[in-house]
Amino acid sequence: MKTLLKNLLPFFVLGFVQVSMGQSSDELIGKWDLNVAMGTTQLPSWLEVKLSGNSTLVGHFVGHSGSARPISEVHFHEGVFDFSIPPQWDGKNDMHLSGTLKDGKLTGTLLSSLGTAHTFTGSPAPALDRTAPKAWGKSQAIFNGKDLSGWTPQTEQRTNQWTVEEGILKSPRSGVNLLSSSSYEDFKLHIEVRYPEHSNSGIYLRGRYEVQVEDSHGKAPSNILFGGIYGFLCPNEMAVHPAGEWQVFDITLVGRRVSIEANGKKIITDQIIPGITGGALNSDEAAPGPFMLQGDHGPVEYRNISIQLPQ
């Protein structure tokens, strides 16, 4: 790893020699939507930089998978910033990110826990500060209970495993995720889900914010367990039923503000989602997005999927 860093050092320095002098760290503080180039693919990431005390910068980072990870210190000098964080689900080495801040944009290089280097760009994340609508429209089904009309499997690398039987949308084994063909901004979502013991899924709002679906019965509430916004927001109680029973969600999203009712209990009320969660489709938070049902973590079933839109 040390040899790899030594070989990459000239590459990092070359990207920094044209940095503007005298930039303030105040310009770096905030939330950033990132795009990381991995081969021919742009994968989404997210960065938050905060001030701790008088001068220390800390933050959080979300990669293209996994949960939000704390950054103990973000180093910043004359427009150049860098930090390191321990590995999470991939690799055994620390992840390193170094970049520049210029004209309100971030550019730089991410050295992954696997030792591969990837360039990235970043823009300030939008506030999405919107007022809740005065009224919501009539509930409309977005799953017809008969077939996959209105839904698209992500079959780029695997074949589709989703089927429809007796009004139930089924993923009998780990495979691909399923996306709604339409995209949405603000909405009320009703959705019911069932899974066997130890299985795991997720409901992605706008394709970017995961509501965790997991066999969490008997566990304390957590932002990575049932009903949490993955890695960010923790439910105020564990409202999950045992595996094998239907779990009922009613979810409202307006801008960044989310409220979640699970099995008749209000577990998250009008909380702000800081940024995208791991596994997001993209980091374009200002745009509408589809619903995405996670199908790559185990068997799962969904039914009675409907939405209400602002009037």
Image (cartoon, rainbow, N blue to C red):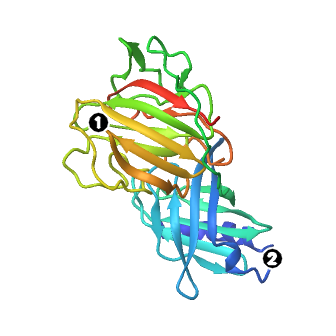
Characterize the local packing of mark 2: few (<14), some (14-19) or many (20 or more) Cα atoms within 10 angstroms. some
266 or 284, which lies in front?
266
Q: Give the image quarter of residue 27.
A: bottom right
In the displayed structure, does residue 221 sit left or right of residue 84? left
Nearest to the observer: residue 187 or residue 291: 187
- Distance of label 2 from label 1 (alpha carbons): 50 Å
Task: Locate the C terminus by quadrant.
Answer: top right
Most extreme residue toward the front is 134
Q: Which residue is mark 2?
A: 20
Q: Position of residue 270 (x, y in %)?
A: 49, 54
Amino acid type, callout 2: Ser
Mark 1: which amino acid? Ser
Query: Hey, which quadrant is residue 245 in on the image?
Result: top left
Residue 308 point in image, percent of width and height:
55, 32
- Residue that extends furthest to the left in the rendered view of this protein: 218
The residue positioned 57% from the left and 40% from the top of the image is 281
Give the number of callouts: 2
> In percent of the image, x 60 and y 33: which residue is there?
309
Residue that numbered label 1 is attached to: 199
Image position of 192 (left or right of 42): left
Q: Position of residue 133 (x, y in %)?
A: 62, 43
Marks 2, 1: nearer the viewer? 1
